[in-house]
Amino acid sequence: KNIKTNQMILLSHLFERVVATAFYPEGMIRLNVLDEKDFEEVPVLRQVLCLCRFIHDENGRLKLTPKGNLPLKVVKEMYEAGIRDWYFEEYPRQRIQEDEARFVRMARDLATKAGIVRKRNNALVMTRKGDELRYHG
């Protein structure tokens, strides 16, 4: 019993150290700087890039459905570019809607929260920040 108590105290101090030094240069957690090619290895970022390509290809304005969702063609390509949902892999369907594909919705939300795209008049448009990232990133 005494050994378990000592292990818990040790773990407690370890967690404190992680929290106290997180993301400092000499801390226990360090972030690696990614190369541009590394971003393409992250599925959700591939989906965000796919969405940005669609907006760009539609002259900077991707029209949404009357319910405010992405068009089916966009959802399909974003889905294929990113994380696959086991349900659609197990039970394939020709049409996957945005509200059914959680990772597509997550990528759209990420792009919106990051300030890359925004909704205007039932369409998605690139923001200035999004344009800068697309052309200079």
Image: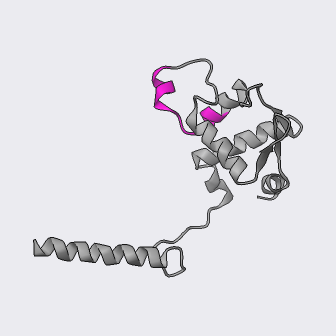
Residue drawn at (56%, 18%) of the image: 93
| Magenta-colored span | 78-91
Color encoding of the figure: one colour
Relative horizontal placement of residue 51, taking residue 6 as reference (left or right) = right
Residue drawn at (54%, 79%) of the image: 24
Q: Quadrant of residue 94?
A: top right
Q: Nearer the viewer, residue 38 or 70?
A: 70
Residue reaching furthest to the bottom: 26
Tell whether position 4 is magenta: no
Could you say where residue 46 lies in the image, as x and y percent from the top left?
65, 44
Residue reaching furthest to the top: 94
Residue drawn at (58%, 32%) of the image: 101
Relative horizontal placement of residue 14, taking residue 26 as reference (left or right) = left
Q: Nearer the viewer, residue 6 or 38?
A: 6
Above or below, comparing residue 30 to residue 84 in the picture = below
Could you say where residue 63 lies in the image, as x and y percent from the top left?
82, 31
Q: Quadrant of the N terminus?
A: bottom left
Could you say where residue 119 lies in the image, as x and y percent from the top left?
79, 41
Please, what is the dominant secondary structure of the magenta stretch?
helix
Could you say where residue 112 lies in the image, as x and y percent from the top left?
72, 48
Residue drawn at (58%, 49%) of the image: 42
Q: Quadrant of the C terminus?
A: bottom right
Q: Nearer the viewer, residue 50 or 19?
A: 19
Above or below, comparing residue 54 to residue 41 in the picture = above
Residue reaching furthest to the right: 59
